[in-house]
Amino acid sequence: MRNSITDVTGVLVGHVTRIGDGALTGTTAVLFPLGTVSTVDVRGGAPATRDTAALDARYGGREVRGIVLTGGSAYGLAAADGAARELGSFVPAAALFDLGRGGDFHAVPGPDEGAEAVRNAGVEVAQGNVGAGTGALNATLKGGLGTASVTLPGGVVVGAIAALNAVGPSVDVDTGLPFATHLGEPGEFPAYQGDDLEAARIAGHAQPFNTVIGVVATNARLPHLYAMATAAQDGLAIAVRPAHGLTDGDTVFAASTGTHDIGTHDVDPGQVLAAARQVFARALVHGLLRAESVTTPWGHLAAYRELYPRTAATYRGN
């Protein structure tokens, strides 16, 4: 297992990353096999989404072949046009705010990036400053894109991918550790190693227009798929404090390939929902820990590994 959303059989992920010439942004495409059904939970006061109404849980969601996560705020939603043309299918999308972080406010993903992300899709998922996480910022730290998964009894798999671009912090300044590290598998996340907490506490600068976007997927056929999206939002609230604010647009898509009937396995819907909460939080921690510091005309975006170097050195990745 790769500890990735692509551990759900048939799910693929592709990135396009744009760094330089005023750009610090990118696009991620999450692709699904035929028959996959999706819905979405949108929270916070500032979402940037496309075609999420078509996934309304009141109507049972909708079959999808792909979902786009992108930088560029509302302008970046144009990336979904290219993804839709490449797939020949309906493609919902969510965008995060990274405008101007590379120096050029107008450097945003478009249809070409969406199509290229689809063509780049595979089972290996790069993390950190890639795709939708390229220009992400988490409070005063560089954010990034992360992924995680868990396998339940009977071969039921739940995986998540998320771009950490939250207004609220995800690191406890009193311990130097991300809030959600306690949810990790044994050895998955680092232990605090005595970094200078005061230096880390005052570093960086926050921006008030941020959001977390992501996808949680499973091979389980769930009677209430929307509940998995809300459970993942709970995971977001564990990893980021506070979450779902007026300047957040936290958006989580839930997708089910439906190949495993949980009624025939030693697992119940509650276990799947608990797993969704856990893997989404873990994906956000990986996005933070995989991010790298960047300096652009906008300023210096210091990563966790720069401010907590001794602790970060014990992180083995996933």
Image (tube, rainbow, N blue to C red):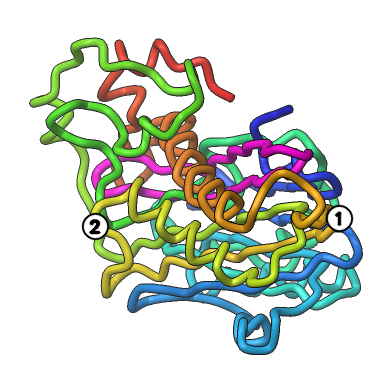
Residue that appears at 78% across and 66% down: 83
Labels 1 & 2 near each other (Cβ < 8 A): no
Q: Residue furthest left?
A: 198
Q: Which residue is mark 1?
A: 259
Give the percent coordinates (x, y) of residue 157. 71, 43
Q: Is residue 137 magenta?
A: yes
**Which contiguous range is marked in magenta?**
135-162
Q: Mark 1: which amino acid?
A: Thr
Q: Residues within 10 Å of mark 2 (few under 14, many from 20)?
A: some
Mark linked to residue 87: none
Give the percent coordinates (x, y) of residue 28. 66, 53
Q: Is residue 203 magenta?
A: no
Specify whether 138 is left or right of 259.
Answer: left
| Front residue of this view, candidates 274 and 168 | 274
Q: Mark 2: which amino acid?
A: Pro
Residue that appears at 54% across and 40% down: 146
Q: Which element is circle 1 on?
A: strand
Residue that appears at 48% across and 51% down: 277
Mark linked to residue 242: 2
